[in-house]
Image: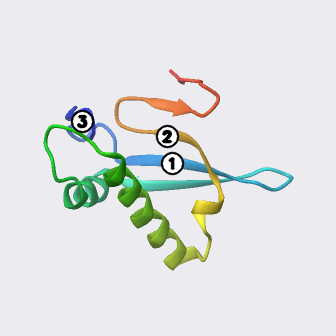
Amino acid sequence: MWSGYDVSGSVSATELVFSVPIEPRIDISYAIHIEAFNTLWNDIHKSKDEVTLEEVDNLFQCLYSHFFRHFRIHLSATQLVKVTASVASAHCEGKVPQ
């Protein structure tokens, strides 16, 4: 989405994995259908030239609010540890899975 890369149906969802700071470690996987994610981003993103920190913060606040409304879990109290998108996947430990 941010790269402008067109996936043309090759990926159905963007996945965000959050780690809950308790022992034993619990991960929460939050998958967002790519069309819904793009619609939300297009409502937030105002410039075609750059992505601002404010826009990214607003995107995550919307996702956090939606998740809390359904599951009563504050994702803002967790750590985002992995993002899997249409063109790549990255982990907070610096791992880029193939």
**Marks 3,1: beta carbons within 8 A:** no
**Marks 2,3: beta carbons within 8 A:** no
Note whether 17 is above or below 50 in the view shown. below
Q: Amino acid at mark 2?
A: Val
Q: Looking at this view, is 40 or 52 the one in front?
A: 52
Residue that mark 3 sits on: 7
Question: At numbered mark 2, what does the secondary structure look like: helix, strand or loop?
Answer: strand
Note whether 73 is above or below 26 in the view shown. below
**Marks 1,2: beta carbons within 8 A:** yes
Residue that mark 2 sits on: 83
Question: At numbered mark 3, what does the secondary structure look like: helix, strand or loop?
Answer: loop
Residue that mark 1 sits on: 16
Q: Residues within 10 Å of mark 2 (few under 14, many from 20)?
A: some
| Image quadrant assignment for residue 62 | bottom left
Where residue 68 appears, as percent x and y from the top left, is 54, 73
Q: How is the image coloured?
A: rainbow
Q: Looking at this view, is 9 or 63 the one in front?
A: 63
Identified at 60% across, 68% down, the residue is 74
Where residue 60 appears, as percent x and y from the top left, is 43, 57
Note whether 67 is above or below 11 in the view shown. below
Identified at 54% across, 24% down, the residue is 97
Where residue 49 appears, as percent x and y from the top left, is 15, 37
Instruction: State how far apart marks 3 and 1 are (Cα).
Output: 18 Å
Q: Residues within 10 Å of mark 1 (few under 14, many from 20)?
A: some
Identified at 34% across, 47% down, the residue is 12
Question: At numbered mark 1, what does the secondary structure look like: helix, strand or loop?
Answer: strand
Q: Amino acid at mark 3?
A: Val
Instruction: State how far apart marks 2 and 3 are (Cα).
Output: 16 Å
Identified at 65% across, 29% down, the residue is 93
